[in-house]
Image (cartoon, grey):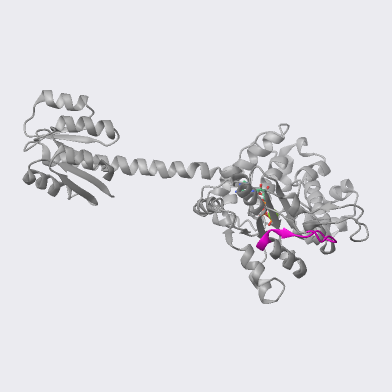
């Protein structure tokens, strides 16, 4: 560690001796002074510790101590004296000296141990300082994570706040790209302005230009009134262009113009409109590949990817999986007080840590919420998470142990198990319904089919298709 020490003594031989001993500690830098005045004048050098002789010509040691303490009360000062005089020692301590050493007596051992103690204190306070810097970041705008890749991400997000560079947020589906975009906006100097989210994949191509830049009345069939586009709506704030890989080439050229000079024209208009908008974008497609095949403009790419922010895959975030699971569990229970509080069983935790999470954080969130809904045990079991083949069945004999409470309305169960913004295919819904009914019917296929109002062959087809494991007992039924 770097430790900067002052040795103040009018006797050069003694000062050299002290310096020689202190140099045994790694990384110490020692500056000698022959008088208290010189040392006080050099306090700007910011020493970590001062050894100060008591008896010196001119300003004596005690007076120097007084001045050092009035200028820099934070710097520890150790008084060094030829004789051990109790009254001087007491006076020094009263003036704020850190310790007192007697020359030729306890000095050689004591100075080293004092310097080491100070070094440790400094080390510790530096650690605390760096932790303190990390703590507010760990909670960065509801972005949960403490793993190394997330700390790196928080650092990167911080850097995006310094200016107005266009930021490209790159990461697999469900890694939190939109959350990061929001955090950048909310923590930037534009936080008071609007934050406009545009999902480029959700806008029909023929409407995209007018959505982005607006249109004038009568500019095309159906343009009954003037429309203010998303870029104008984001004026003074931030626009987040999600799924940027979906823009067609014509619009890419127009977007480039906005990025270059913050100017746009409404469709059917000839007025040039100046906007002040920061652009963030996201993609889970490899845009550089699109440049090669000619579907993405290289110049726009460089403009958009001025500052890339890469989101780590959930499987790279170690224990964050459990932090996130806990976060989603409490969040869901707060929103749904009617649901019984359950914690995760050790098996469930182990499973979450070992699972590969192809759908990243979104998959975890859905799994936790679904588990809370379907769990009947005292804790959330591994099977409640339904990971892997998501519709895997719970053992039918386990259903028997649960009793009548498991007979919930499957439609309600299915509906509430799904994230409000997620789209679930009809096939997945059917599979969920079958999985649930099968469990409620204790693994009896006939009963399952009857309760669902479908034929047995439909049940078998869905089970096969979604890899829903029927128990061995059902083989007989299947043969019938
Ligand atoms: N680190 C995190 N802490 C807390 N919640 C998170 C975190 N990361 C993601 N989430 C939550 O997970 C869900 C998915 O995140 P988000 O929509 O931002 O992902 P995305 O990368 O934009 O996904 P897609 O590529 O599918 O659009 C959201 O509900 C979000 O709030
Ligand atoms: Mg998204």
Residue at the image position 69 percent from the left and 54 percent from the top: 240
As displayed, is residue 343 above or below residue 422?
A: above
Q: Over which residues does the magenta segment extend?
A: 259-271
Residue 472 visible (yes or no): no
Q: Is residue 341 left or right of residue 115?
A: right
Magenta highlight on residue 264? yes
Q: Position of residue 466 (x, y in %)?
A: 76, 59
Residue at the image position 68 percent from the left and 58 percent from the top: 262
Residue at the image position 11 percent from the left and 38 percent from the top: 107
Quadrant for the C terminus in the image? bottom right
Of residues 106 and 76, which is closer to you in this image?
Answer: 76
Residue at the image position 19 percent from the left and 35 percent from the top: 78
Q: Position of residue 243 (x, y in %)?
A: 71, 60
Q: Is residue 162 left or right of residue 236?
A: left
As displayed, is residue 313 above or below residue 86?
A: below
Q: Position of residue 192 (x, y in %)?
A: 65, 42
Q: Position of residue 230 (x, y in %)?
A: 76, 53
Magenta highlight on residue 236? no
Q: Is residue 421 left or right of residue 133?
A: right
């Amino acid at each position: 560690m770097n430790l900067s020490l002052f040795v103040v003594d009018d006797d050069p031989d003694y000062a050299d001796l002290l310096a020689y001993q202190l140099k045994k500690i790694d990384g110490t830098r020692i500056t000698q002074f022959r008088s208290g005045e010189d040392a006080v004048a050099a306090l700007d050098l910011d020493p970590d510790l001062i050894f100060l002789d008591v008896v010196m010509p001119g300003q004596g040691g005690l007076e120097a101590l007084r001045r050092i303490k009035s200028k820099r009360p934070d710097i520890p000062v150790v008084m060094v004296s030829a004789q051990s005089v109790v009254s001087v020692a007491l006076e020094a301590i009263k003036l704020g000296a850190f310790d007192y050493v007697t020359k030729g007596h306890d000095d050689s051992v004591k100075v080293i141990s004092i310097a080491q103690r100070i070094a440790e204190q400094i080390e510790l306070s530096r650690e605390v300082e760096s932790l303190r810097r990390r703590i507010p970041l760990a909670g960065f705008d509801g972005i949960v994570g403490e793993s190394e890749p997330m700390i790196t991400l928080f650092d990167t997000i911080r850097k995006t706040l310094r200016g107005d560079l266009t930021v490209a947020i790159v990461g697999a589906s469900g890694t939190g790209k939109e959350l990061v975009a929001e955090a950048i906006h909310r923590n930037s100097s534009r936080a008071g302005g609007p934050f406009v989210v545009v999902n480029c994949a959700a806008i029909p191509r023929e409407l995209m230009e007018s959505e982005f830049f607006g249109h004038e009345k009568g500019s095309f069939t159906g343009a009954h009134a003037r429309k203010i586009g998303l870029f104008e709506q984001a004026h003074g704030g931030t626009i987040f262009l999600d799924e940027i890989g979906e823009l067609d080439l014509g619009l890419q050229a127009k977007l480039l113009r906005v990025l270059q000079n913050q100017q746009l024209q409404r469709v059917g208009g000839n007025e040039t409109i100046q906007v002040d908008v920061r652009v963030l974008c996201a993609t889970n497609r490899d845009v550089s590949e699109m440049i090669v095949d000619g579907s993405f403009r290289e110049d726009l790419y460089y403009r958009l990817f001025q500052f890339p922010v890469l989101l780590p895959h959930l499987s790279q975030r170690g224990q964050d999986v459990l932090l996130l699971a806990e976060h989603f569990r409490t969040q869901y229970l707060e929103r749904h007080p009617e649901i019984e509080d359950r914690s995760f069983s050790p098996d469930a935790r182990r499973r979450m840590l070992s699972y590969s999470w192809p759908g990243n954080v979104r998959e975890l969130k859905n799994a936790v919420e679904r588990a809370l809904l379907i769990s009947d045990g005292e804790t959330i079991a591994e099977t409640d998470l339904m990971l892997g083949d998501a519709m895997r069945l719970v053992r039918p004999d386990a259903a028997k142990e649960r009793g009548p409470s498991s007979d919930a309305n499957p439609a309600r169960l299915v509906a509430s198990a799904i994230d409000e913004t997620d789209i679930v295919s009809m096939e997945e819904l059917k599979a969920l319904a079958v999985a649930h009914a099968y469990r409620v019917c204790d693994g009896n296929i006939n009963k399952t089919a009857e309760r669902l109002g479908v034929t047995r062959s439909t049940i078998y087809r869905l089970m096969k298709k979604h890899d829903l494991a029927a128990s061995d007992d059902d083989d007989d039924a299947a043969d019938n």
